[in-house]
């Protein structure tokens, strides 16, 4: 699917891909949803994938809140650069090791819905004009939301499909 270029496409793709992600998880028997991935990866199970998405939603929501208040957010997070995102992602992974799968789905649902509300509240111009908001640097607000929603959901589905294939789940 082509990367969203306007608000309608962003809302549609984010909603569709989020539903596809949930349908994919639901296509796996309940007991198998908690299994460890049988391949080497930072994320060891579906829960890890979902909390990763949730935390990146949280970061995007924080960038938005801080940026729209006139301040400059730390992107991706304080103490990290885009080159050190692997280290940041490991910290995220560690943070959620006591979270269960059901709670990870609730958390993801909450932050997905918050992002959808923010997207809906903006015009095409506000979302897809590069540098429209000073705090987005050289990119656009829409590109940030694409990265934290629809394209990130594609990443998650790819990982979960790999898990299904590796374990022989139909």
Image (cartoon, rainbow, N blue to C red):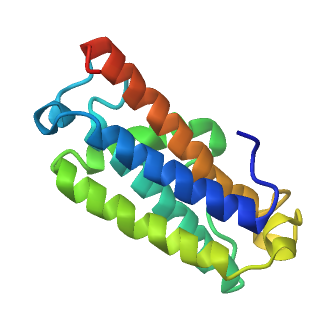
Q: Residue at x 63, y 54 (%)?
A: 13
Name the one closer to the observer, 9 or 83: 9
Position in image of residue 115 (x %, y %): 54, 69
- Against 140, residue 132 (above or below) is below
In-image side of 110 versus 5 (left or right): left
* Residue at 19% across, 54% down: 102
Q: Nearer the viewer, residue 127 or 26?
A: 26
Does 36 sit above or below residue 53? above
- Residue 113 falls left or right of residue 160: right
The residue nearer to you, when weighing 140 against 87, is 140
Confirm whether residue 77 shows in the render.
Answer: no
Q: Please give the name of the residue rendered at 25% of the width and 50% of the height, measured from the top-left corner.
A: 96
Using the rendered view, name the quadrant where residue 152 is placed: top right
The residue sitting at 73% across, 59% down in the picture is 9
Estimate the x, y position of residue 155 in percent, counting from the top left: 52, 35
Q: Vertically, is 4 above or below 62?
A: above
Regarding residue 102, the answer to whether it shows in the image is yes
Count of number-bearing discs? 0
Residue 88: x, y in percent?
Answer: 47, 44
Q: Position of residue 50 (x, y in %)?
A: 36, 47
Q: Quadrant of the C terminus?
A: top left
Q: Residue furthest bottom?
A: 69
């Amino acid at each position: 699917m082509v990367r969203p270029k306007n608000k309608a496409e962003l809302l549609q793709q984010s909603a569709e891909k989020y539903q596809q992600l949930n349908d994919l998880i639901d296509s796996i028997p309940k007991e198998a949803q908690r299994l460890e991935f049988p391949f080497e990866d930072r994320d060891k199970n579906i829960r890890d994938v979902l909390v990763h998405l949730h935390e990146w939603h949280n970061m995007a929501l924080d960038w938005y809140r801080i940026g729209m208040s006139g301040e400059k957010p730390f992107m991706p997070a304080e103490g990290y650069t885009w080159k050190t995102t692997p280290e940041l992602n490991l910290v995220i992974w560690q943070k959620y090791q006591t979270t269960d799968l059901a709670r990870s789905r609730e958390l993801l649902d909450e932050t997905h819905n918050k992002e959808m509300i923010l997207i809906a509240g903006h015009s095409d111009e506000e979302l897809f004009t590069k540098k429209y908001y000073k705090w987005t640097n050289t990119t656009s607000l829409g590109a940030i939301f694409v990265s934290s929603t629809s394209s990130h959901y594609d990443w998650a589905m790819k990982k979960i499909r790999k898990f299904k294939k590796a374990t022989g789940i139909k």
